[in-house]
Image: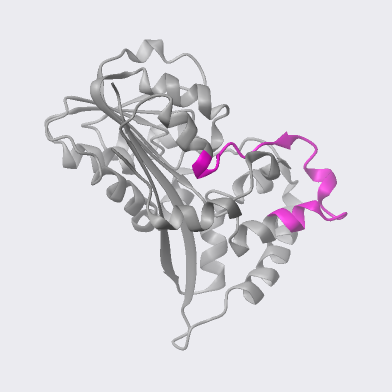
Amino acid sequence: MRIIPGGFARTCSGYPSKTVFERSFIMPDWNASQYLKFEKQRTQPAIDLANRIGLTNPVRILDVGCGPGNSSRVLKDKYIQARVIGIDTSENMLEKARADHPDIEFRLCDASGDLSELGEGYDIVFSNACLQWVPDHERLLGRLMGLLRKGGVLAVQVPYNWSEPIHIIIVEISKTDRWNDYFPEKRIFHTLTPGEYFDILSGLTPDFEIWETTYYHVMESHEAILEWYRGTGLRPYLDALPDGKKSEFEKEVMDRLIEAYPKQKNGEIIFRFPRLFFTAVAR
């Protein structure tokens, strides 16, 4: 079965290809405490993704890019009997994950590298808001599907907010003459379009689904939006800047945020965040 809701046909042609997302910056240094300041909002997509997995009694689950363990917790709570293994490249994230979730196994592992040490025969390979940092999704998804037993499920969520004001603002500011020289290294945003994922997944299995959900987060202030992005999308830019320039860069972003995100009548702010999901069953 292959299901793509009507919204795909309506919006797919408007999505830029991955090459449009090239931009200068370095790989971020993750901070678990910063990331978890919005734990409830960041965890909801993992809950929604887990609820779309059609298995009842999985035994082995791999959480790729587990971060501080919030997504692994979702999986363990849903499948109490299962052995859940979370992998991540950040020691800071893993330290927090191990401290907060001692009943779950966590390992240092790079999803873009050799995964053979993880073994095969998983019932679920899960990834929440991680694969956008990993290159070559055509090869990657094939390797992740290869970790599954027959009938096992690959379940993935990636942010899909390239057209949202916050993303556009950061990219535009980073390109200005004042800031461009601070980001000399090219980065490619590895997320593909829904159509590209369709072609990859259809070559791996006839049984997959693709869908998109836009979350309307309620923020109490513009500073809260900036604080959210300090834990993710703004992180690589801040890491590339000298200490004396970080606050200046953030101020320019904040000035644009105030214009782009109007307050509601009660003073709160709607922060839209689209996310792309897909599941695929191994054959």
Which residue of the protein is positioned furthest toward the right in this rendering?
A: 177
Within the magenta stretch, is there residue 175?
yes
Tell me where residue 187 sits by quadrant.
Answer: top right
Whole-percent x, y for residue 92 in the image: 46, 35
Part of the protein shown in magenta: 171-195
Q: Between 228 and 203, which is closer to the camera in this rendering?
A: 203
Q: Between 60 and 29, which is closer to the camera in this rendering?
A: 60
Whole-percent x, y for residue 262 in the image: 57, 79
- For the point 66% across and 68% down, the residue is 254
Quadrant into which the C terminus falls: top left
82 lies above or below 47: above
- For the point 51% across and 17% down, the residue is 113
Tell me where residue 165 sits by quadrant.
Answer: bottom right
Whole-percent x, y for residue 150 in the image: 24, 19
Residue 57 in sight: yes
In the displayed structure image, the side of residue 105 where residue 68 appears, left or right: right
109 lies above or below 250: above
Within the magenta stretch, is there residue 3?
no
118 lies above or below 224: above
- For the point 48% across and 51% down, the residue is 34
